[in-house]
Image (cartoon, rainbow, N blue to C red):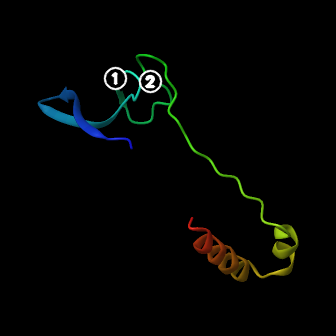
Amino acid sequence: MISITITPCCRIAGEIRLTPVLPCPACGFDNPQGMRFCGACGERRPVTVLFADLVESSALTARLDPEDLRSVLLTYREAAGA
């Protein structure tokens, strides 16, 4: 689980702007949101990716109306728990 902390990043004319930061799981450095690598240790963030191939999906796409295809795919996603 990633925790997000809000910290002041700068003061402009007495105004404090807040920027979300993500602590690095390896070294604990507070990285500004959007950084792909840790600014201190260079550690990459872990990501889980699932690729799924739907059998006959190309033929189904050619045969069905776009709204009907969307309905079929949404039903599949719900059944898969996505």
Pointer 2 and pointer 1: residues touching (CB < 8 Å)?
yes
Secondary element at image label 1 = loop
Q: Amino acid at mark 2?
A: Cys
Residue at mark 1: 29
Is 35 on the left-hand or right-hand side of 15? right
Q: Is residue 29 above or below residue 73?
A: above
Residue at image mark 2: 38
Q: Residue at x 81, y 69 (%)?
A: 57
Residue 7, how many percent across, how many down? 22, 33
Residue 59 x/y as whole percent: 88, 72
Number of numbered tags placed on the structure image: 2
Q: Residue at x 31, y 41 (%)?
A: 4
User: Which residue is painted at 57% across and 44% down in the image?
Assistant: 48
Q: Residue at x 37, y 41 (%)?
A: 2
From mark 2 to mark 1, how far is it between C-alphas? Answer: 7 Å
36 horizontally vs 60: left or right: left
